[in-house]
Image (cartoon, grey):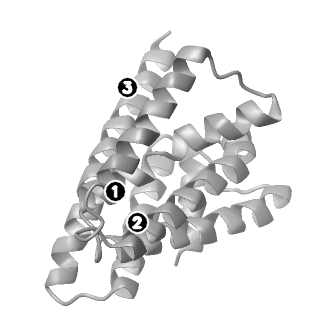
Amino acid sequence: MVKKKNGDSVGIILVLISSLSVAFLPNSAKLVFSNGVNASTLLFARAVLGVTLLGLILLVTKNSFSLPRHLIFPSLISGLLALAMIATLYEAIGYINVGLSILILSLNPVLIAVYSHVRGTYFISLRQSFCIFFMIIGLALLVLGDVNKISIYGVLISFISTFCAVLITLISSKSTNKIGSTRTNFYLNLWGL
């Protein structure tokens, strides 16, 4: 029972760190870009930070760093997609509001649910369908409400980032189930170096 409580505590801490990162990283990227740092430097720094923090978590929790041979290729593809996701997100925030780019990126779970529904592995209820429909209508109104002020290029790049996130989730789900999310994310960041 004590081990379970410790595992829950680590999980809660990881969720908090992840939530703060989602809010902090794109905003800090906008700030860093305005001070002359290029995207390559920021991507490299982000990957180093991710590898360091996740490596420390693996050490503290006494988890293995090993990656089974059959997961190397999917892990590498997911890592490259993660790099593309972040690079396109950084590109998008140069053209559109950070909030809008994050909102578009946040469609990731919805797209995964729709994909899973089409494949028959998940059922979207009528209520969920209405929520998805109205969310898409709201996003369309936000984007198309004043086309003259919103960069279509920035919106399209944000959607590319979102599709990368969907592919990462679908491809790395097997790794996550097999070796855990911390080790999976460690390798996602490592391949980004």
Mark 3 touches mark 2? (CB < 8 Å): no
Please give the residue where the numbered disc 1 appears in the rendered image.
143
Q: Nearer the viewer, residue 187 or 113?
A: 113
Circle 1 crowding by C-alpha within 10 Å: few under 14, some 14–19, many from 20: some
What separation in Å lies between label 3 and label 2 (alpha carbons)? 37 Å
Circle 2 crowding by C-alpha within 10 Å: few under 14, some 14–19, many from 20: many
Q: Nearer the viewer, residue 131 or 184?
A: 131
- Let me know if residue 131 appears in the view: yes
Give percent across and percent down for residue 107.
48, 45
Mark 2 touches mark 1? (CB < 8 Å): yes
Amino acid type indicated by mark 1: Val
Please give the residue where the numbered disc 3 appears in the rendered image.
9
Amino acid type indicated by mark 2: Val
- Of marks 3 and 1, which one's residue comes earlier in the chain? 3
Q: Nearer the viewer, residue 23 or 17?
A: 23
- Of marks 2 and 1, which one's residue comes earlier in the chain? 1
Please give the residue where the numbered disc 2 appears in the rendered image.
155
State the SS at label 3. Answer: helix
What separation in Å lies between label 3 and label 1 (alpha carbons)? 39 Å
Above-or-below relation of 167 to 151: above
